[in-house]
Image (spheres, rainbow, N blue to C red):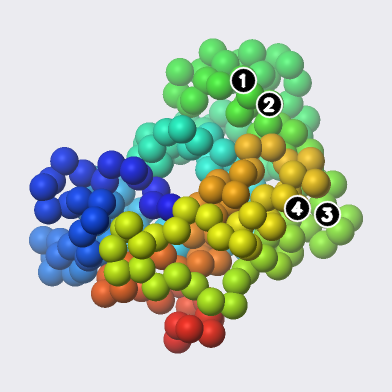
């Protein structure tokens, strides 16, 4: 799954194309050239390992809010989300009350979706409960696959996998919501558990996470 279903109006950036050369001469996955914001995210953050609890909770929350929307929409609102959700501190969010729900529903800076808001609060509570059983990071990273996809075009990038289906099932069993297999796979991409940078991209393999079919 790519972060944005419609990468760019640029005719050279199409869902079926391979890597695209930017003005700086570097090859990237097409969606990265959708905007300066997306390019910076692609070059500096997407696909890099995240193992700290708060960082994982934030990314899991934002992936949940993305459902049905483009990633660029969420990324543009990320600082608003951080302000609204106490920097995605699980302990703080777990203590949110119905008054906070009403506050968030009135906040035009975020996605005002009651189900996603209440799911984020519940997911914070589930995150705290996991601390007694190894923690959120240990759970998520235990589903890292031995191999990673090697897509040459966006059409070859999967949107789910056996591991994302298993991770989704486990998260739901632990009380998490808005964590379907596609959302779980997007999370795995975002935190470097799989590498779906197109073959030939200057970012391919940049996470340093080792896979049996890819050096690094």
Circles 4, 1 touching at the beta carbon (< 8 Å): no
> Which disc, if any, is residue 30?
none
> Which disc, if any, is residue 114?
1
Residue 181 shows up from this direction: yes
The answer to which quarter of the image holds residue 157 is bottom left
Q: Taking 43 as reference, is 119 left or right?
A: right
From the image, state whether disc 3 or disc 4 is nearer to you: 4
Quick one: SS at disc 4? Answer: helix
From the image, state whether disc 3 or disc 1 is nearer to you: 1
Quick one: SS at disc 2? Answer: helix
Q: Taking 103 as reference, is 73 left or right?
A: left
The answer to which quarter of the image holds residue 4 is top left
Q: Which of 106 and 117 is in front in this view?
A: 117
Q: Earlier in the sequence, mark 4 or mark 2?
A: 2
Q: Residues within 10 Å of mark 4 (few under 14, many from 20)?
A: some
Quick one: SS at disc 3? Answer: helix
Q: What residue is pinned by disc 4?
A: 170
Q: Taking 71 as reference, is 14 left or right?
A: left
Circles 2, 1 touching at the beta carbon (< 8 Å): yes
Circles 4, 2 touching at the beta carbon (< 8 Å): no
Rendered view: 119 above or below 56: above
Q: What residue is pinned by disc 2?
A: 118
């Amino acid at each position: 799954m790519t972060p944005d279903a419609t990468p760019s109006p640029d005719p050279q950036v199409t869902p079926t194309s391979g890597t695209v050369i930017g003005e700086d001469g570097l090859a990237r996955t097409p969606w990265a050239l959708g905007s300066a914001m997306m390019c910076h995210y692609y070059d500096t953050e997407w696909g890099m390992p995240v193992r700290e609890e708060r960082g994982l909770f934030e990314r899991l929350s934002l992936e949940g809010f993305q459902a049905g929307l483009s990633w660029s929409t969420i990324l543009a609102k990320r600082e608003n989300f951080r302000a609204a959700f106490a920097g995605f501190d699980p302990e703080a969010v777990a203590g949110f009350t119905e008054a906070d729900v009403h506050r968030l529903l009135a906040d035009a800076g975020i996605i005002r979706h009651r189900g996603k808001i209440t799911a984020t609060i519940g997911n914070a509570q589930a995150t705290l409960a996991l601390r007694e059983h190894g923690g959120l990071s240990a759970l998520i990273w235990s589903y890292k696959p031995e191999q990673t996809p090697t897509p040459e075009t966006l059409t070859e990038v999967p949107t789910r996998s056996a591991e994302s289906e298993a991770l989704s099932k486990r998260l739901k069993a632990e009380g998490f919501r808005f964590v379907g297999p596609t959302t779980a796979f997007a999370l795995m991409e975002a935190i470097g558990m799989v590498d779906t940078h197109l073959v030939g991209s200057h970012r391919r393999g940049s996470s340093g996470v080792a896979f049996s079919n890819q050096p690094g």
